[in-house]
Image (spheres, helix red, strand yellow):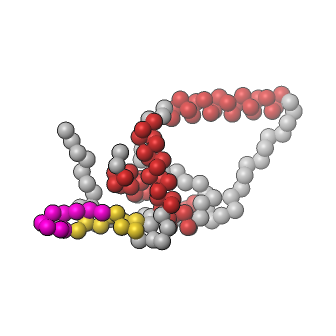
Amino acid sequence: MGTDTAKEDVFTSLRVHNPGSQYTHFSEALDGEYFRQLTAEKFVITKKDFQTVGNWVKTGERNEALDCAVYARAAVSVRRPNFRKIARSLFRTAEKLRLEREAAGMQRPRPLRSTSAPFRNRPKAKRRPIGHRRQPKRP
């Protein structure tokens, strides 16, 4: 997976508003700076020597969050984890720990509360112009 493809995937997933396929979940603890960094680049199409060329251009000072998202997409692409198997294992472990705590007479821990702004106030990703998206190469 190339960097351009990974960035395109990240920005495409930011436009998905309903949970499901391609939707990206974010913690409520993330602040506006994280989302500014995540959207700190844009895809710009230019024409050079009668050829259309597209490049990612930084629009913000910092883009570490975008870089981390790209690295995460690359890791998933390379490792191809079985998320259902991982989720089942995590839920089994959590249930086992819950039963052990109950047997020991321990109280259930209180959920953590977020101290930052609510998730629904996060900035929306900017829409890219029509024709910006590269079509996947087909054999």
- Is residue 16 among what the camera can see? no
What number of labels is visible?
0
Identify the residue at the far right of this view.
Answer: 105
Q: Residue at x 43, y 57 (%)?
A: 14
Identify the residue at the far front of this view.
Answer: 49
Q: In the rendered view, would you say 78 is above or below 60?
A: above
Q: Residue at x 85, y 36 (%)?
A: 106
- Is residue 67 among what the camera can see? yes
Q: Residue at x 38, y 55 (%)?
A: 7
Q: Say whether residue 47 is left or right of residue 116.
A: left
Q: Position of residue 41 (x, y in %)?
A: 40, 65
Q: In the rendered view, would you say 137 is above or below 133?
A: above
Q: Position of residue 32 (x, y in %)?
A: 56, 67
Q: Position of residue 6 (x, y in %)?
A: 38, 51
Q: In the rendered view, would you say 95 is above or below 22?
A: above
- Image quarter where the C terminus lies is top left
Q: Say whether residue 27 is left or right of residue 21.
A: right
Q: Main secondary structure of the magenta part?
A: strand
Residue sitting nearer the eye, 33 or 129: 33
Magenta residues span 47-55
Q: Residue at x 63, y 65 (%)?
A: 117
Q: Is 51 in the magenta?
A: yes
Q: Is 53 in the magenta?
A: yes
